């Protein structure tokens, strides 16, 4: 067992040297769209409707279809919303989406979205027989499809084992999104050099909010706006990164997309706010941490 503090030592944000953003900006908003491939031969990654008598079934067509709606319909609403406000997100993608849903993956390439490795299919890292091989297969598949190897990685459901960061660094990954423990990037030590942990989110994330906590559809907008207001205020002294996480089968529903659009419009109305991909955050942080 490895103590997490051996990989990423504790650091109070108020004690660190001040980072500076270009143009004296206060806040980076990091939009992350997650697209996945759910295999019908496995239990579904999540459920919107429970099985009769609470007994899980395989195949689970109702919940598979719920996810499939996101790929056929919901994702296109998200494409349109982001394009309307001139925002380029990071795409956290199961690599097999490139094979099963090439129309969706190609649209993301054409729109200039950053591809973030998200394993091969949607299943926990702990269940893989050969984690190292799947990491390489995932990165290779995305590189073959897009022409560019992903710089970052996020495990399905943010899952890792004690060895995952070592395998990722060994494979050439430069940043990870699984460590949701800060408002700024942090350095993480592995057996093969350092990784940068860029702050993803489980709080401004439609899965916990809508599927676990069962909030009303406008809650994603309200909570994100309240977080944005506070981080924007704090960013005048200590710059912050604010991730927002969307899944097309959730945020892409017709009764939720309007709130997503209203959130984007709200955040775009402020000066001193940057909308960056994970790669842009990574490049900035490597440079900014060196400056006095």
Image (cartoon, rainbow, N blue to C red):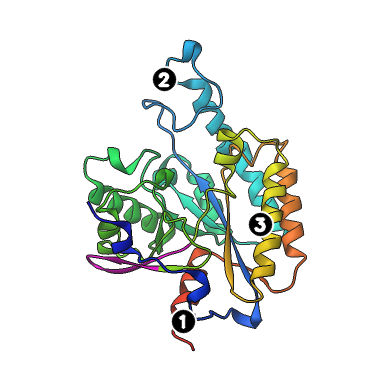
Q: Is residue 73 left or right of residue 94?
A: right
Real-space CA distance between mark 1 and mark 2, rounded to the nearest whole angstrom = 49 Å
Q: Quadrant of residue 70?
A: top right
Q: Nearer the viewer, mark 1 or mark 3?
A: 3
Q: Is residue 204 left or right of residue 17?
A: right
Badge 3: few (under 14), some or many (20 or more) residues near its Cα, within 10 Å?
some
Q: Is residue 43 left or right of residue 262?
A: left
Judging by the rendered image, the residue that carries numbered circle 3 is: 227
State which region is magenta.
Answer: 187-198
Q: Is residue 86 visible?
A: no
Q: Main secondary structure of the magenta part?
A: strand
Q: Is 230 one of the magenta-colored residues?
A: no
Q: Position of residue 55 (x, y in %)?
A: 43, 15
Q: Earlier in the sequence, mark 1 or mark 2?
A: 2
Q: Earlier in the sequence, mark 3 or mark 2?
A: 2
- Badge 1 element: helix
Q: Earlier in the sequence, mark 1 or mark 3?
A: 3
Camera-nearest residue between 109 and 221:
221
- Badge 2 element: loop
Q: Position of residue 109 (x, y in %)?
A: 52, 57
Judging by the rendered image, the residue that carries numbered circle 2 is: 59
Q: Position of residue 132 (x, y in %)?
A: 24, 51
Camera-nearest residue between 88 and 183:
183
Judging by the rendered image, the residue that carries numbered circle 1 is: 287
């Amino acid at each position: 067992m490895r103590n997490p503090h051996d990989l990423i030592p504790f650091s109070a944000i108020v004690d660190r040297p001040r980072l500076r953003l270009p143009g004296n900006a206060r806040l980076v908003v990091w939009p992350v769209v997650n697209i996945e491939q759910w295999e019908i031969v496995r239990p579904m990654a999540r459920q919107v409707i429970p099985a009769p008598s609470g007994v899980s079934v395989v195949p689970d067509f109702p919940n598979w279809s719920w996810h499939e709606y996101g790929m056929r319909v919901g994702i296109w609403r998200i494409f349109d919303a982001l394009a309307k406000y001139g925002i380029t997100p990071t795409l956290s993608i199961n690599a097999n989406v490139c094979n099963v849903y090439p129309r969706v993956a190609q649209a993301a390439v054409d729109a200039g979205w950053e591809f973030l490795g998200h394993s091969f299919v949607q299943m926990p890292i702990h269940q893989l027989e050969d984690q190292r091989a799947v990491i390489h297969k995932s990165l290779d598949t995305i590189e073959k499809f897009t022409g560019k190897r992903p710089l970052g990685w996020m495990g399905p459901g943010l899952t890792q084992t004690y060895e995952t960061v070592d395998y990722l660094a060994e494979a050439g990954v430069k940043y990870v999104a699984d460590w949701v423990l800060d408002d700024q990037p942090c350095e993480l030590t592995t057996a093969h050099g350092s990784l940068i942990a860029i702050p993803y989110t489980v709080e401004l994330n439609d899965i916990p909010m809508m599927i676990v906590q069962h909030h009303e559809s406008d809650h994603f907008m309200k909570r994100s706006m309240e977080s944005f207001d506070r981080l924007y205020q704090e960013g005048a002294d200590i710059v912050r990164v604010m991730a927002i996480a969307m899944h097309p089968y959730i945020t892409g529903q017709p009764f939720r997309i309007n709130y997503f659009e209203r959130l984007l419009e709200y955040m775009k109305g402020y000066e001193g706010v940057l909308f960056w991909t994970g790669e842009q955050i990574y490049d900035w942080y490597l440079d900014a941490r060196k400056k006095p």
